[in-house]
Amino acid sequence: MLSENIKALRKSKGLSQQDLAVKLNVVRQTVSKWEQGLSVPDADLLIALSEALETPVSTLLGETVTETDADAVKALSEKLETINLQLARRKAMRRAALHWLFLAACVGILAVAAALTLVSSPYLGWDYSAPETAVMGVVIHAFEWGFVRLAPFVLIAALVGAFLTRKKVRTL
């Protein structure tokens, strides 16, 4: 029973005899002898074996463990591959959307800067004795004042963001 359980658990974990031997710091032939029932591990190695196979000692010594169906493992791996591809596509789409958002921010900042340059502060010639134009002049002046001070930093951040989110060309 122990020999069958060791072999079944090792295979279910996807380990070769050599891999298991390396984990236990023994030679591959030792693992082979355990699986053939020619020898048994001592108590210390039995505990190390249970840790390496991530199963309790009682399971190793208990009932026969059945090997996992290879078809089920293959189907599961195909599903995981599909999920990984979907996640990679989503990540690429989010990265592209973020890239275009940064580029749009750059264009927007440059467009507002060009508009403000062409208009050349129209509020300076306004009649501030009328309450409506005075408030509007102050609002436009405050916008220009804030824009002139913040736009360079936002533009630089947007350019850096666009650079960092660009699609990288892979060369082999």
Image: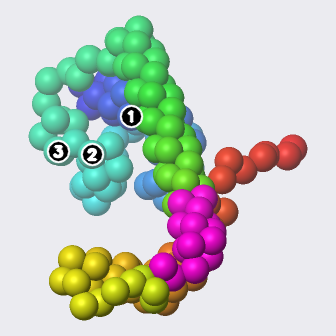
Viewer-closest of 58 and 140 = 140
Q: Does the magenta stretch include residue 5?
A: no
Q: Residue at x 62, y 76 (%)?
A: 117
| Disc 2 versus disc 3: nearer the observer | 2
Q: Is residue 131 visible?
A: yes
Tell me if residue 108 is in the magenta stretch: yes
Q: Give the range drawn in magenta.
A: 107-122
Mark 3 highlights which residue?
56
Q: Residue furthest right?
A: 172
| Residue that carries the numbered disc 1 in the rendered image | 13
Along the horizontal axis of the image, is 44 left or right of 37? left
* Amino acid type of the residue tagged 1 in the rendering: Lys
Number of dots carrying numbers: 3
Residue type, mark 3 in image: Pro
Expressed as whole percent of the image width and height from the top left, the position of residue 43 reads 24, 55
- Is 142 placed left or right of 14 in the picture? left
Q: Are marks 2 and 1 in contact (CB under 8 Å)?
A: yes
Instruction: Name the residue that disc number 2 marks.
Output: 54
Pick whichever, 22 or 4, lies toward us.
22
Front residue of 90/14: it is 90
Q: Tell me which secondary structure the magenta stretch mostly adopts.
A: helix
Q: Distance between the residues labelled 2 and 3?
A: 7 Å
